[in-house]
Image (cartoon, rainbow, N blue to C red):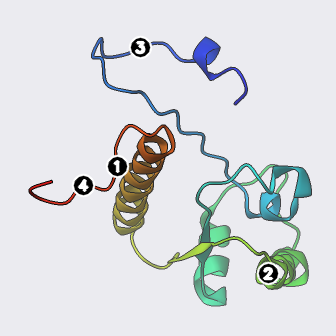
Amino acid sequence: MENLGQSLGSTTGSRTQEIPILIIEGFLLFNYKPLDTTWNRCYFLTIPYEECKRRRSTRAYEPLDSPGYFDRHMWPMYLKHRLEINSITWEIVYLDGARSEEDLFLQVYEDLIQELANQSASIVLANGMVKNREPGK
């Protein structure tokens, strides 16, 4: 993040401002204090127990989950960390993990487009390039 210019290459050849997007996956990272100031947007997928257990059972893990692992460890840890996340002071957008991947993608995409538009407007205002203009003035 400190050297974005070194990691970005122009992919379009246009003169529009490129805004880098970094996606970090893993809800446990919400509790990692050194990253507290890194987030612009946070999303947390909620999911009912039955659906979570069903999805977990369809995955192939190496090594395989031991019998009862989901109920003894996975689900209790999800609940524990979800409670901890409730004490976080920044905004978290909760997403219904039972919705389709397509619906979730569209919701996040639209939210990010709005966030980027808000950031661009803030940057322009901070640089003093645009003042509050009213029609006819």
Q: Amino acid at mark 4?
A: Arg
Going from N to C along the chain, the mark reached first, 3 or 1, is 3
Residue beneath disc 4: 133
- Mark 4 nearby-residue class (10 Å; few <14, some 14–19, many ≥20): few
Residue 72 in percent (x, y) is at 90, 82
Q: Amino acid at mark 1?
A: Lys
| Contact check, label 3 and label 1, Cβ < 8 Å | no
- Nearest the camera: 70 or 133? 133
Residue beneath disc 2: 75
Depth check, mark 2 against mark 4: the one in front is: 4
User: What whole-number distance in Å separates the C-alpha atoms at marks 3 and 1?
Assistant: 30 Å
User: What whole-number distance in Å separates the C-alpha atoms at marks 2 and 4?
Assistant: 53 Å
Residue 117 in percent (x, y) is at 37, 51
Residue beneath disc 3: 10
- 15 vs 65, left or right, is left
| Contact check, label 4 and label 1, Cβ < 8 Å | yes
- Mark 3 nearby-residue class (10 Å; few <14, some 14–19, many ≥20): few
